[in-house]
Image: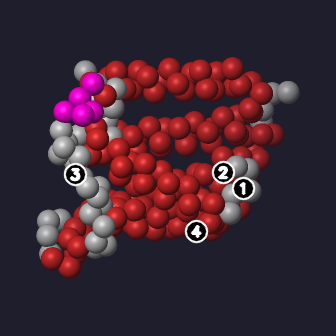
Amino acid sequence: MNYLIDFAALALVYVFAFFPRWRKMGRDRLLVHTLMYAYLSSVLYFTLMPVLCSLPYLLDHPYTPMNLVPFIDVSLGRGDYLRQIVLNVLLTVPFGFLYPLTRNGKARCAETVLLCLLMSLGIELLQPLLNGGRSSDITDLITNGTGGLLGYGLYVLFRPVTDRILNLLRKNQAP
């Protein structure tokens, strides 16, 4: 039920953000922005949800400070560090790929990676606030930034393909 409230809120935000502009955006822009919105919603699901039901309990648990020692789990052989690193990289690859598409290909690599790092920092700072069992880790920031960089590299590699697909959508659109 907690997740349902968050998903309902996300659906309402989507409708109010995109519905008034659907016809003006065109299918190509709507597709790209919808993919980015769906991606960001899934990031929220995996990292922060439930959010709205957690707000009343924001101050009911101690805030765990961020671990500022990079890759300490790796050096100590603690937990399933390899899985965590891979998942954190994979989490932000779509951001690195989709963000330049939302900017009509005008986003530079540095801008994309910086925004990816800011999104990751926001998540890392909010996790312990919303859930007392979660903690923040500098390794997550590093691996998320790496994922954004890899995603941007994939964007550059596949740009001819994505441009062709978006142009087809644009041409097949009714005037």
State yes or no: discs 4 and 2 in contact (Cβ < 8 Å).
no
The reply to whether discs 1 and 2 touch (Cβ–Cβ < 8 Å) is yes
Query: Residue 47: x, y in percent?
Result: 33, 45
The reply to whether callout 3 and callout 4 are in contact (CB within 8 Å) is: no
Q: Which residue carries the number 4 mark?
A: 153
Q: Is residue 11 magenta?
A: no
Give the magenta range.
56-60
State the residue at coordinates (44%, 37%).
Answer: 41
Residue located beneath label 2 in the image: 101
Determine whether the residue tagged by mark 1 lies in a helix, strand or loop.
Answer: loop
Front residue of 29/125: it is 125
162 is higher (above) or lower (below) than 40:
below
Query: Pointer 1: what residue?
Result: 105
Residue under numbered circle 3: 64
| Residue 13 coordinates in the image, percent (x, y) | 52, 25
**Could you tell whether 18 is left or right of 122 in the image?**
right
How is the structure coloured here?
Answer: secondary structure
Question: Could you tell me if the residues under marks 3 and 1 are in contact, i.e. CB atoms within 8 Å?
Answer: no
* Residue extending furthest toward the right: 175
Mark 4 residue type: Gly
